[in-house]
Image (tube, helix red, strand yellow):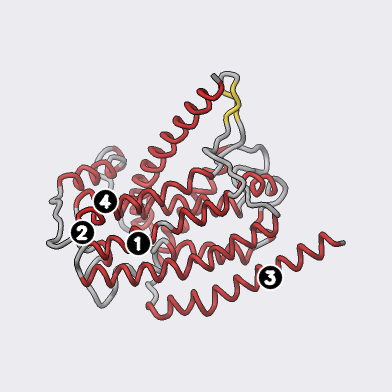
Amino acid sequence: MELLIQILVALVKSVIIFFGLIMAAAYMTLAERRILAWMQDRIGPNRVGPLGLLQPIADAVKAMFKEDFMPEGADRFAYWLAPAIAVMASMLTFAVIPIGPQINLFGFPIDLQLADPSVGILLVLAVSSLGVYGVVLAGWSSNSKYSMLGAVRSSAQMISYELGMGLAILSVVVTVGSLRISDIVGFQAVVPVVLIQPLAFLLYWVCAVAENNRPPFDLVEAEQELVQGYMTEYSGLKFAMFYLAEYVNMVTISSVAVTLFLGSYHGPIIDGPWWFAAKLAAMLFVLSWLRATLPRLRYDRLMRLGWQFILPVALLNVVATAVIVTVMSAT
């Protein structure tokens, strides 16, 4: 009976996470458009529903009825698989993110986290790396040279910045001494990691933004090619899935930043999910702020930033953290 309850609770959590991420991504598109309009002295979408709140639903319906084509000579299976991989990889990371402390529901203790494996950090890094497969498959299966070039460009960018992001997260692991997410969150009950590892937080944030192809690192759309990169040959719902994956990834990378660096659900007065939600909203606002403020980098400067600056600095930070932790533990 207890096992059945645990399975039922896990299924309910999975459904809540799935639909919660979809709704968060949908309304993040509206929030970003309103934030950009506010910063650029425009109005933004406000006609569909009260205050424009039904605009994401209108966008979804529009995507359903758009012409859904497939290029001649495309690999049918891989062409459909690519957007599915992109969405799946963007959602799986959230399985190990705790949004609040344990609660009691009808006498049963419920963790506000789907899973807490002992190697949770490795799971985050492994799942986030799967997104590159969706990009490569989309470009290759489309049977288009423009799509293939866009896929190569985007995958090179993603792989390059994943290295720096992994080293930034490794600094947190060395500081806390555990790969388990709950241990890292518990460590921050006294002080958030960002106060101990400010450089690691900055490196993680830059790498996460670049790895998600967000401005100012949105090199998916090349300036010399008026195309959409690896998504050029996609339309309708399949294009909407790539669009959904981008905004789910925005929520995911912000959630990881809140969990690993900003104290997660811990707050100055009383712990709770509202602290997690407030910090998450602040990080998502910063993503929109970056889009409204910074121009796009040139591709060679983008790669130089990742390989010649972020990677060595992140590696030095890991070494310095390891030395400090070793010295402090020995004394």
Please indicate whether residue 238 sits to the left or right of residue 270 in the image.
left
Left or right for 46, reference 258:
left
Q: Secondary structure at mark 3?
A: helix
Q: Nearer the viewer, residue 30 or 73?
A: 73
Task: Tell me the residue at 27%/65% (across/down).
Answer: 139
Amino acid type of the residue tagged 1 in the rendering: Gln
Q: Is residue 100 left or right of residue 81?
A: right
Instruction: Return the x and y of residue 292 as percentages of the image width and height.
Output: 38, 63
- Do tag 2 and tag 1 residues touch (Cβ < 8 Å)? no
How far across and how far down the image is residue 268, in percent?
67, 43
Which residue bears the numbered disc 1?
A: 40
Distance from disc 2 to disc 1, alpha carbons, whole Å, reads 42 Å
Q: Mark 3 or 4 closer to N-term?
A: 4
According to the picture, the residue beneath numbered tag 3 turns out to be: 319
Does the CB distance between marks 2 and 4 fall below 8 Å?
A: no
Q: Residue at x 64, y 46 (%)?
A: 185
Mark 4, residues whose alpha carbon is within 10 Å: few (<14), some, or many (≥20)? some
Nearest to the eye among marks 2 and 1: give it: 2
Residue labelled with disc 2:
75
The amino acid at mark 4 is Ala
| Residue 43 visible (yes or no) | no
Q: Residue at x 15, y 51 (%)?
A: 68
Q: Earlier in the sequence, mark 2 or mark 1?
A: 1
Q: Nearer the viewer, residue 58 or 19?
A: 19
Secondary element type, mark 1: loop
**Element at badge 2?**
loop
- The amino acid beneath tag 2 is Asp
Which dot, 3 or 2, sits closer to the camera? 2
Please name the residue that numbered disc 4 is placed on: 240
Disc 1 to disc 3, C-alpha distance: 43 Å
